[in-house]
Amino acid sequence: MILSIETSTEVCSVALHSDNKLLAYSELFTEKSHSSALTLLIEDIIKNTQKEMKDLQGIVLSQGPGSYTGLRVGTSVAKGLCYALNIPLYAVNTLLAMSYVASKMIFNQPVYLCPMIDAKRMEVFSMLTNPDLEIIKPVEALVLTTESFTEILANQVIVIFGDGANKCKKIIPNENLLLLENIYPSAKAIGDLFFLQKAQEVSIAYFEPFYLKEVYTKVKLSEAVNQPI
C-alpha cells in the first residue's frame, strides 16, 4: 500500500493506492493550512479505509516546483513517516503529474501539454510534454510575455492548465493556445505515476524539494546598510 502526498500549491491532498488501484483520496482547498491539515488528512484516510500505518510500503511525494512552505511541510511529514515506518520515499515532478491528468482529457490529440503553477507577478513554473508524457521542454521559471511560445505556436497547439494558465491566456491571444480548466496538482495523480514507473526513489536523509527558484530569507547587504539601528 502506497501513500501519496501533494502540498505544492494551496491544495493539500493525500491518496492511498494498492496494486495500482485507488483505495481512497482526500483533499483540502484552504490556503496556508498544510502544516495543520496534512497529518489529519493522513490519519483520516488510513482510518476510513480500515488500514493501519504499518500497512504502508512506501510514500510518494510531490517534489515541486511550487510553494516553498507547502513543499517543506509535505517533505517533513513524508520523511518523518518514512523514518518511523522504515519504508522508502519516492518523488514525482509536480508538473508532470499535472500533465498526466490533462492527458486523460485530450484523448490523444496531437497537442503539447503545458502545466503552469503561478510563481507570482508574471512568472509561472512550467514545462512542455506530449500526451505520452515525453518531455518536450524541461521545467523552467518562465516570465510570460507576448513572445512566449511564439515559434512553437506557429505550428503546434499548446494546451495550458493550472493556476498560472489564466494569466498566460490573457497575455498570449493565440488561437493555438488552448486553456483547460480545473486541473491542479493532486496526490491521486502522484500515486498513479508511481505505478507507471514515473517516480524516483530518493534518499530520506538528503532529499530536498525542487524549489526551482532560490528562496531569499536574508536581507540584501545594500538594503541592510541603509536600515536604522
Image (cartoon, grey):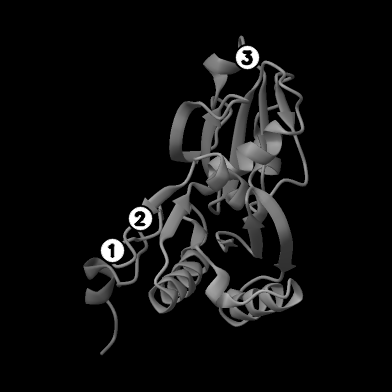
Instruction: Say whether disc 3 or disc 2 marks the residue closer to the N-terminus.
Output: 3
- Which of discs 3 and 2 lies nearer the camera? The answer is 2
- Which of discs 1 and 2 lies nearer the camera? The answer is 2
Report whether 14 appears left or right of 121: right
Q: Report how far apart the C-alphas of labels 1 and 3 lie in the structure.
A: 40 Å
Residues at discs 1 and 3 in contact (Cβ within 8 Å): no
**Nearest the eye: 169 or 23:** 23
Disc 2 residue type (three-letter)? Val
Q: Quadrant of residue 56?
A: bottom right
Q: Secondary structure at mark 1?
A: loop
Instruction: Say whether disc 1 or disc 3 marks the residue closer to the N-terminus.
Output: 3
**Nearest the eye: 225 or 135:** 135
Q: Secondary structure at mark 2?
A: strand
Label 1 sits on residue: 206
Residues at discs 1 and 2 in contact (Cβ within 8 Å): yes
* Residue occupying image coordinates x 43% and y 33%: 138
Tell me where residue 157 appears, x and y as whole percent: 67, 18
Query: Is residue 201 visible in the rendered structure shown here?
Result: yes
* Residue occupying image coordinates x 40% and y 59%: 209
Tell me where residue 140 appears, x and y as whole percent: 44, 39
Q: Which mark is residue 202?
A: 2
The image shows residue 119, relative to residue 68, as above or below, that is above
Label 3 sits on residue: 156
**Nearest the eye: 98 or 171:** 98
Disc 1 residue type (three-letter)? Tyr
How would you rate the neighbour count of disc 1 (Cα within 10 Å): few for under 14, some for 14-19, many for 20 or more? few
The image shows residue 220, relative to residue 118, as above or below, that is below
Q: Report how far apart the C-alphas of labels 1 and 2 lie in the structure.
A: 8 Å
Tell me where residue 189 appears, x and y as whole percent: 64, 48
**How many numbered discs?**
3
Disc 3 residue type (three-letter)? Gln
- Which of discs 1 and 3 lies nearer the camera? The answer is 1
